[in-house]
Amino acid sequence: MAMSFSLRTIAVVALVGLAGLVMAHGNVTPQDVDTGNLPELGDDVRTANPFREGNEYGKYNAQAIKVGESAYAGNCAACHGIRAMSGGLTPDLRELTEWDDEYYIGRVMNGTDRGMPSWKKSMDQNAMWAIRTYVESLPKPE
């Protein structure tokens, strides 16, 4: 009887652990992003971050960071970690200095073979560039 209880206990613990791993992937349902008063960028895909200081809409940088922080928390943090500090399964976005803007927008819009979904149907480029601006504003790891 004790042996049966032990096996049952191990099975329950294993199933609960497995369920935890499945849930750790996070909410994969895209969350709406309120882009506030950011200028509407239109349908033509930008290849440079318009919200970076000194760019076309650079004066909106502080607002873009705020919008990007909210959008990142609702749509990216489940996989890429709080404040872009990856837990190891995905890149630490603060370290991706080789990602130029054109590469970034292509990855976000089209997704990756490794499991990142395409966001082009659920998020406009205003939100995508705001997220990029937010991640760029974070301190780099030492």
Image: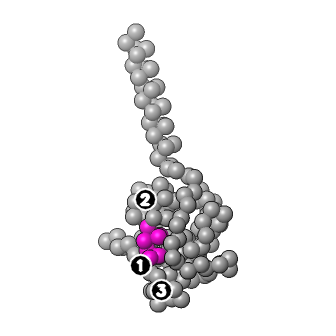
Residue 64 belongs to magenta span: yes
On screen, residue 112 above or below 45: above
Which residues make up the magenta segment? 62-69
- Tell me the number on the disc at residue 137: none
Residue 77 % position (x, y) = 46, 59
Q: What residue do we see at 45% from left, 33% from top?
A: 16
For residue 112, what is the image quadrant?
Answer: bottom right
The answer to whether residue 95 of the structure is visible from this angle is: no
Q: What residue do we see at 60% from left, 65% from top?
A: 123
Front residue of 141 and 28: 28
Question: Which amino acid type is shown beneath numbered disc 1?
Answer: Ala
Q: What residue did someone put label 2 on?
A: 81
Question: Which amino acid type is shown beneath numbered disc 2?
Answer: Gly
Question: Which amino acid type is shown beneath numbered disc 3?
Answer: Gly
Q: Mark 2 packing: few (<14 Cα in 10 Å), some, or many (20+)?
A: some
Q: Mark 2 or 3, which is nearer the eye?
A: 3
> In the rendered view, does 78 fall on the left or right side of 123?
left
Q: Residue furthest left?
A: 142
Front residue of 134 and 140: 134
The tag earlier along the polypeptide, 2 or 3, is: 3
Q: What residue did someone put label 1 on?
A: 62
